[in-house]
Amino acid sequence: MQIRILGAHMTEIASAKLPGLLIDGVLALDAGSLCSSLPLEAQRQIKAIFLTHHHYDHVRDLPTLAMNLANHTSVEIYCIQPTSEVLSTHLFDGGMYPNFLKWPDHRPAIRFTIIKPYQLISVASYSVVAIPVAHVVPTVGFQVSSAGGKSVFYTGDTSAGLDVCWEHVHPDLLVTEITMPQRLEDWARKTGHLAPGLLKAELLQLRKLNGYIPRTVLVHMNPSYQSEVEREVATIAEELGADISLGYEGLTIDL
Ligand SMILES: [Zn+2]
Ligand SMILES: [Zn+2]
């Protein structure tokens, strides 16, 4: 299973793209950078998109992806009910761009499949489970397991409070977020994100519950704070004796 990080940031500048992972070229987790990162043919190879939540940075490329698929193919979007409700009423309502849930008439470019937390979903040769995480709107992380028995857990946006979540995952690779530097921990809590101290506590809890800390790659950085966060994460990695690093656009990891 190959995991490719398309976007590792929570906003976009020339050197930073919005959140999104691509697994073996066919399965996407979040849709912030599907179009800005992939050539046309690669976009049409995607079989399913799993959305963690409805925030704009995680869904930004869905309308343009749909335009690129229209009259050629279509894609299934898996998400929880609150996510589909917001997208249907704000992004796919036909107000600013075509309503790709209904267009093209003969085969709309996208379809929603509503999933429930902890429900096992089989897509192609993968098993996917949605696990609720702590954010300011309803959000789920996804554990994706390959037929070969390897798995990645992507939290999407999350803050502290992952105890229950950790009981349901046993990943070979953890992809989670780091949005703020340590001095903004209060702001991170308020906005449902992680700062280095919060991340460290969550990883300690993961090790206590599951006996190990998997390789951990961090995304959702704010470019304004990146160098500060990078230094603080290096300290945490040393303190925990764990493989923890910042992800970046184009990073691929083979499991
Ligand atoms: Zn976000
Ligand atoms: Zn969010």
Image (cartoon, helix red, strand yellow):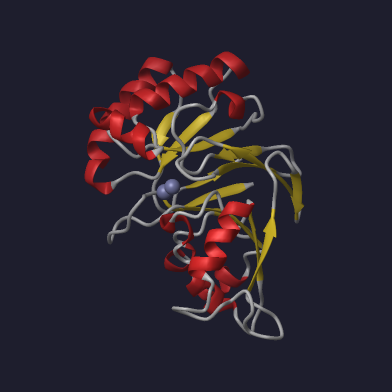
Q: Does 74 sit above or below residue 77?
A: below
Between residue 8 and residue 241, name the one nearer to us.
Answer: 8
Residue drawn at point x = 38 percent, y = 37 percent? 178
Q: Is residue 101 left or right of residue 250?
A: right
Q: Position of residue 133 (x, y in %)?
A: 54, 36
Front-lying residue, 173 or 89: 89
- Image coordinates for residue 205, horizontal then vertical, percent: 52, 18
**Residue appearing at x 48%, y 60% in the figure:** 59
On the picture, is 181 further left or further right than 101? left
* Residue at position x 45%, y 54% in the image: 55
**Where is the C terminus found, in terms of image quarters?**
top right
**Residue shown at 54% from the left, 45% from the top:** 138
Residue 200, quarter of picture: top left
Q: Where does the image place residue 99, in percent across and percent down from the top left?
A: 56, 78
- Kindly indicate the quadrant of the structure image that contains residue 172: top right
Whether residue 211 appears in this view of the structure is: no
Image mark count: 0
Image vertical order of residue 30 relative to residue 160, above or below: below
Residue 183 x, y percent position in the rendering: 23, 28
Picture layout, residue 44 above or below residue 180:
below
